[in-house]
Image (cartoon, grey):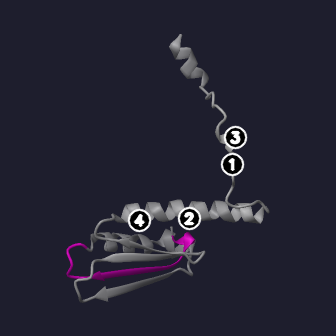
Amino acid sequence: MLKFLSKVRIEFNALDPRLASCMEFLAQCNARKAKESNPSCQVQIKRRTDDFPPRITVTFVNGVEETFDATATPAQDIRTMILDKGQFLETEQMFKEAGEKWPVVIPDEELLQPFTGIKPKKAEEKKQ
């Protein structure tokens, strides 16, 4: 997960009962496998003393910053969003390295072509 990130900032009040997502996400960031995937990723923790809701801010390797409301978003959902966006970044990088245009533009005439579908042989055999 951290391999797609350059910085993680976790803000919470230790006395706030809504901090579960922050603590779970912090545990995921501190896992050995996550740290090994990107040792240069900075993980910052800000312990607040006010009533500010817990939040997690991540900065991707391309500089894009995204903030999550940790009161409404489970840590696993945040992790999934990061991995999805990371795969998108990897795909974009792969196209750029290959000298291809990004984003890929599919011509309208190709989008309008009918798709006949592909059925595995076992599915066809069961119908008979």
Disc marking residue 14: none
Name the residue beneath numbered marker 3. 110
Q: In the structure shown, which secondary structural element does the residue marked by tag 2 occupy? A: helix
Gap in Å between the C-alphas at discs 3 and 2? Answer: 28 Å
Q: Are the residues flagged by discs 4 and 2 in contact, CB closer than 8 Å?
A: no
Q: Are marks 1 and 3 in contact (CB under 8 Å)?
A: yes
Callout 3 secondary element = helix
Q: Earlier in the sequence, mark 4 or mark 1?
A: 4
Label 4, on which residue? 78
Give the mark nearest the N terminus, 1 or 2.
Answer: 2
Q: Which residues are magenta?
A: 2-18
Q: Amino acid at mark 1?
A: Ile
Q: Helix, strand or loop at disc 1?
A: loop
Say which label, 3 or 4, has the lower sequence index.
Answer: 4
Residue 8, given in percent of the width and then of the height, sits at 46, 79
Q: Amino acid at mark 2?
A: Gly
Q: Nearer the viewer, residue 46 or 110?
A: 110
